[in-house]
Image (cartoon, rainbow, N blue to C red):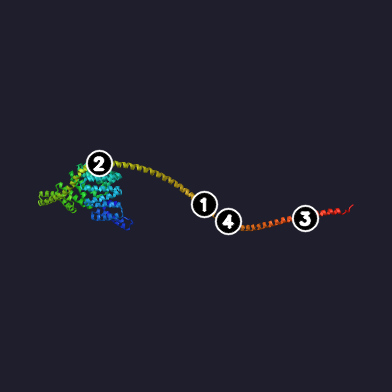
Amino acid sequence: MYEYIRTLARQKPDTLPALVQELRSWTQKSPYPLREGVAALGEAVQWWSQGQYDSALSRAQTALRIFQEKKRSDYEGKTYNLIGLIYNDQGQYAEALEAYQKALTIFERIDNQDGMATLYNNIGNIHKAQGQYAEALEAFQKALTIYERIDNQDGMATLYNNIGNIHKAQGRYAEALRAYQKALTIQERIGNQEGMATLYNNIGNIHAAQGRYTEALEALQKALTIRERMGNQEGIASCYNNIGTIHAAQGRYTEALEALQKALAIRERINDQESIALSYDNIGILYQAQGLYTIARSYFQKALPIAQSLGLQDQLDNIYLHLAQTDSALAASGLTHLWKSAYLHHRLYAAYKDSVRNEASIRKQAQLESQYEYDKKISLLKAQQEKERALAHAQLQRQKTERNALLTILAVVLLALSTMTYYQILLRRKNRLIQQQAHQLELKNSELQSINQALTESNKIIQAQAEELIAKNAELTTLNTELEATNKALSNSYLTIQHQAQELARKNEEILDSIRYAKRIQQAILPSHEK
């Protein structure tokens, strides 16, 4: 969300208030724990983009307290970075640098590589603004090394552009052009149209500074084509302004005026006051070069109140000089009342020039103090760059190896997934078969349950019959016991009777023997009746 709001603030500032309003509405109903902090941060970006720095700083401090209480180091670092940007835009470089250093410390602790590179870039811009080119170049180089390590193409292009700006500020046009070309190659590769337009514009300015006007116009025309396609009105105006100044340098005043008038019309339409003052001044210079002093003076007088209201000291000294020159020319041509105006404007020019010169002198002194360090560090930086590039190349090779390994693993995983899918299909088929068999088993089980219930009933009947049989068996056992006892008694009686019978038989035999003996005796005794 933070990056989106910042991007919107740069590219479509008119839509930012509506977005921030939606963000406020969202915080009232969202359960997101950081909602208040995010809303405050969004409002801070809005105020910052509108130049209301006190309000922006207040909301940023509120967001910072919330993120610190929630212990969200990532958002805390981003908020410190925004605070640094707010201070930077106000020219409070010490405060901006302090905020950037706090953000950098946080990002180093949580190993946020992209955030670290962003902070080194911002720190480099602070040093550049103060004329400390060696320190600026060192910071830019650190940021570039990180972006190369994490392969952030857009970040690399930005840093090459910033390094080119350092070389340009020092008059090292060849080095600046090489840096811009590297940045342009990257922007073309990733298709960043706005980045390409910026680089073509910078390259055009380098060619113009070296008097190569044909190459300069060619580069600026490419930048203009891209910005027209994108609808970047501020960029289009800047291109027309630069094209106009190149035509003017070649003495092609008609083409120059046409281009400068187009730039002015766009700037008036988008109400870019600072650039409007610059356009008025440039058109005045063009008329002045043609000896049309009255027209030139009218444009300088239009530029003057705008520059005064905005406090544009760099433009004010030029405008006062141009007014002094045109007033002098007009006074010499007969408008003698303008001699006083020419004198006054020249005194104002001298006063502002001294003021600007003092500031420039301070910057120059800082630049001279850092020049020795720059010369000493530049060779070290180049050696370090080569070393870090070698390390980055080695890391890229490792990353490629790891990527190939990951691709191999991915292929194996895909093969495994295909195999698993095939087996899942088989399993689904088996499951359907099992489900059918289970259904059949359920039917059979139902039948078995019915049979089991019948068997249970039968078992109950059998059990009742068995109990009855057991009872009868017990009765039979009792009867059998009684019978055995009776049989035993009968057997004993039988034996007794048998014994008695034997005894009776023996006695009978004895009696019979006695009778037979008696009969023989009788026969022997008694006579026989026969003859």
| Mark with earlier residue (1, 2) | 2
Displayed quadrant of residue 382: top left
- Residue 437: x percent and y percent? 50, 50
Looking at the rendered image, the disc whose residue lies closer to the viewer, 1 or 3, is: 3
- SS type, badge 1: helix
| Mark with earlier residue (3, 2) | 2
Q: CA separation, marks 1 and 4?
A: 25 Å
- SS type, badge 3: helix
Is residue 220 visible to us here? no
| Mark 2 lies on residue | 382
Is residue 391 visible to us here? yes
| Mark 4 lies on residue | 459
- Residue 265: x percent and y percent? 21, 51
| Mark 1 lies on residue | 441
| Mark with earlier residue (4, 2) | 2
Q: Amino acid at mark 1?
A: Leu
Mark 1–mark 3 CB contact (< 8 Å): no
